[in-house]
Amino acid sequence: MSKIFAVIGNFGVGKTSVLSYYNHKKTDEPYFTDCEGFLMLGGKHGADSMGKYYPKNYTLDVILPAKKDRSIVIHSMFYNGVKDLIAYKKTHEPHLIYLKTSFETNVRRMHGRSKNVPDAQDYNAFERSTEKLIFACKNLLDIPVVTVDNNRELSVVAQEVWDYIKSA
């Protein structure tokens, strides 16, 4: 069965940077790029960019099932809830990759890129919701979870993430 790798992490932690470690190539599909033989939903900008063009349920119910024979990487803030993972299980074997990042690293990476640097309350709310998602994956959904220490250089993190994706 083909796989879906859902890469998650707080706003601004470097999901796009990690998944742009290798070059993206255009495909015949308007929804995907190809990176190392994997389809990347939304291309190098990620799945959240799909919302500009298609409702989320269209992506979950039509676009992804049409690619049931291909493995897909999804990096996003809005395509990684329990309902999304359940939808992925209909046609793919989902894997969750969590880029665990300290508050300090999160702020440092966002500083200079955005005016919307997270405050501690927002950061902690995301961490709590991620803990619940990981619990559901491990204990209720039988979805493998990999936690990657994202407080290191992004090139090191990218290599670890891609090594996992290629070997799973």
Image: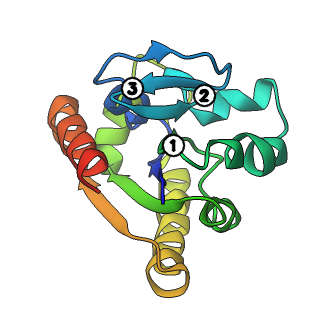
Q: Which is nearer the N-term, disc 3 or disc 2?
A: 3
Mark 1 and mark 2: Cα distance apart in space:
15 Å
Q: Amino acid at mark 3?
A: Cys
Disc number for residue 21: none
Q: Which is nearer the N-term, disc 3 or disc 1?
A: 3
Q: Amino acid at mark 2?
A: Gly
Considering every residue shown, the one lying at the far top of the view is 26
Question: In the structure shown, which secondary structural element does the residue marked by tag 1 occupy?
Answer: loop
| Nearest to viewer (mark 3 / mark 1) | 1
Q: Is residue 43 visible?
A: yes
Mark 3 and mark 2: Cα distance apart in space:
12 Å
For the C terminus, the image quarter is bottom left
Q: Residue at x 79, y 44 (%)?
A: 62
Considering every residue shown, the one lying at the far bottom of the view is 139
Quarter residue 163 falls in: top left
Please rate how many residues cluster around mark 3, counting C-alpha atoms within 10 Å: few if below 14, some from 14 to 19, many from 20.
many
Question: In the structure shown, which secondary structural element does the residue marked by tag 3 occupy?
Answer: strand
Q: Residue at x 61, y 35 (%)?
A: 47
Mark 3 and mark 1: Cα distance apart in space:
12 Å
Disc number for residue 35: 3
The residue under label 1 is: 70
Q: 99 or 106: nearer the eye?
A: 99
Rendered view: 75 above or below 142: above
The residue under label 2 is: 42
Q: Residue 149: give x, y in percent of width and height.
A: 22, 52
Please rate how many residues cluster around mark 1, counting C-alpha atoms within 10 Å: few if below 14, some from 14 to 19, many from 20.
some
Q: Residue at x 50, y 42 (%)?
A: 72
Rendered view: 133 above or below 20: below
Rendered view: 160 above or below 86: above
Question: In the structure shown, which secondary structural element does the residue marked by tag 2 occupy?
Answer: loop
